[in-house]
Image (cartoon, grey):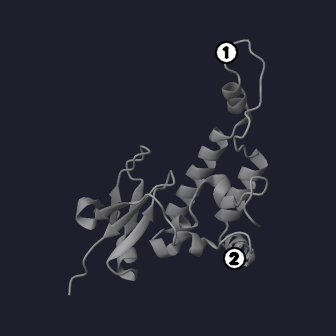
Amino acid sequence: MSSSPSNPTHYEVLDVSPSLLSSSHGTTKDLESQLLKRAYHRALLRHHPDKAAAEGAKRVGETYRKPAAAALYTVDQITTAYTTLGDPKARREYDLALRQSTDKPAPEQEESFRTGFDIIDLDDLQFDEAAERWYMDCRCGNERGFQFGEEVLDEREREVFVGCQDCSLWIKVQYEVAP
C-alpha cells in the first residue's frame, strides 16, 4: 500500500486529497460522488495512451518516443482507484490498509502538512444560499474549486483548511465564532 512510482495510492492515481472525500469536511455523498466522477474522468483524459503518444512526438511524421519520467497510470489503475474510493466500505478498508502501511502516512496525517496555502477570511468567500455552502474560485480555473458547508465551521474552531476539488491547492479560511 505504500506510495512509490510503481505503486501509487488510489488517491494519487485520481489526484484527489483524502480529506476532500471526508465527511468531516462537509462533503455529502452526492458531492463526494460528483468529485470522484470528475477526478476519474480527468485522470482518464490526462493519462490516455493516445494523448501520451501525441505529446511524445515533437513534429508530424516523427516516430513515437515514450516520455521519460512522466507518471502514466493505466486505465486499470484508474478504474480500480475509482471503484475502490467510490464504495464507502471498500474505501474504509483501503484507508485502514494505508494507515497500517509504514511507508505511507494515513490520510488524516497527510492533512496536517500543507504547503503553499493562502490565508482567506470567511467574509471574502461567496455564499450559495440554495446549497448553503461557501465557495471561492481557484487558480486552476474551477469557479467553485474551494467549497464547504457550515457544518465544517461548527466542527472546527476559528480556521478550516479547504482543498480545491480539481487541483492540489489549499486555502486556510479563518473566522471568528460569535459569542
Residue 120 falls left or right of residue 42: left
- Judge left or right: residue 54 versus residue 160: right
Please state the horizontal and vertical placement of residue 115, each as a whole percent of the image.
Answer: 47, 61
x then y, percent, for residue 121? 26, 65
Tell me where residue 87 sits by quadrant. bottom right
Q: Is residue 131 above or below residue 143?
A: below
* Relative vertical location of residue 127 with respect to residue 154 in this rendering, above or below: above
Question: Is disc 2 surrounded by few (<14), some (14 to 19) or many (20+) residues within 10 Å?
Answer: some
Most extreme residue toward the bottom is 179
Camera-side residue: 78 or 69? Answer: 69
**Mark 1 residue type:** Arg
Q: Amino acid at mark 2?
A: Arg
Question: Is 82 situated left or right of 114 in this image?
Answer: right
Q: Residue at x 68, y 73 (%)?
A: 95
Q: CA distance from mark 1 to mark 2?
A: 46 Å
Q: Residue at x 63, y 39 (%)?
A: 45
Q: Nearer the viewer, residue 95 or 40?
A: 95
Image quadrant where residue 62 sits: top right
The image quadrant where one finds the C terminus is: bottom left
Q: Is residue 176 depicted above or below 114 in this figure?
A: below
The x and y percentages for residue 9 are 70, 61
Residue at the location (58% across, 66% down)?
18
Q: Which residue is mark 1?
A: 59
Q: Earlier in the sequence, mark 1 or mark 2?
A: 1
Would you name the residue on which mark 2 appears?
99
Q: Is residue 108 above or below residue 145?
A: below
- The answer to whether mark 1 and mark 2 are in CB contact below 8 A is no
